[in-house]
Image (cartoon, rainbow, N blue to C red):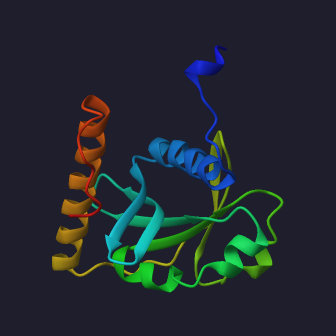
Amino acid sequence: MDQNADPLPATPGQRLARGVARALRDLGFVTVEELMPAPGLRVDLMALGAKGEVWVIECKSCRADFQADRKWQGYLEWCDRFFWAVDADFPTGLLPEATGLILADAYGAEIIRMGPASPLAPARRKAVVQGFARHAALRLQALRDPGGVISAWA
């Protein structure tokens, strides 16, 4: 296979995000990386299901990466389910049991533990889905017109 056709993302977290995105696409979800649902919050991966379900996935490449994350609980109010995505070498005993768990690499992923359901309120869901769509459209526009400016969640 031509390596240019499948460039490997630069960082371990980006590689995890790519594998998770591939697996979620097979489950009917579309994803956006590094999305800001609110000022001061940036989720690694947000997924949107065909029926409007919103998942947030935080990708952790090592123990130190997880221990440095002080914002993850703030993401819970922006999704229906929350997951950690880690590789097979990650010490999963560190992760809170009341959260979802995905084992991943750059090429795929498997849901090990489903995140508990905590449905968004209708008004919040509408805002999240609209923000997701707007952000995805801005990313597409930036690919078409690299001189354009990408706004965060606006």
Picture quadrant where residue 59 is located: bottom right
Identity of the residue furthest to the front in this view: 147
Question: Would you place residue 144 above or below residue 95 in this image?
Answer: above
Residue, x 23% and y 45% (percent of image)?
A: 137
Q: Position of residue 91 (x, y in %)?
A: 82, 71
**125 and 152: which is toward the camera:** 152
The N terminus, quarter of image: top right
Q: Position of residue 120 (x, y in %)?
A: 29, 78
Q: Does residue 122 appear in the picture of this structure?
A: yes
Picture quadrant where residue 126 is located: bottom left
The C terminus, quarter of image: bottom left
Q: Position of residue 16 (x, y in %)?
A: 63, 52
Q: Is residue 149 left or right of residue 31?
A: left
**120 and 128: which is toward the camera:** 128
Question: Would you place residue 52 above or below residue 19 in this image?
Answer: below
Q: How many marks?
A: 0
Question: Would you place residue 127 above or below residue 45 in this image?
Answer: below
Q: Does residue 114 appear in the picture of this structure?
A: no
Q: Position of residue 93 (x, y in %)?
A: 79, 79
Residue, x 41% and y 75% (percent of image)?
A: 41
Question: Would you place residue 27 above or below residue 102 in this image?
Answer: above
Q: Is residue 133 left or right of residue 106?
A: left
Residue, x 48% and y 41% (percent of image)?
A: 26
**144 and 37: which is toward the camera:** 144
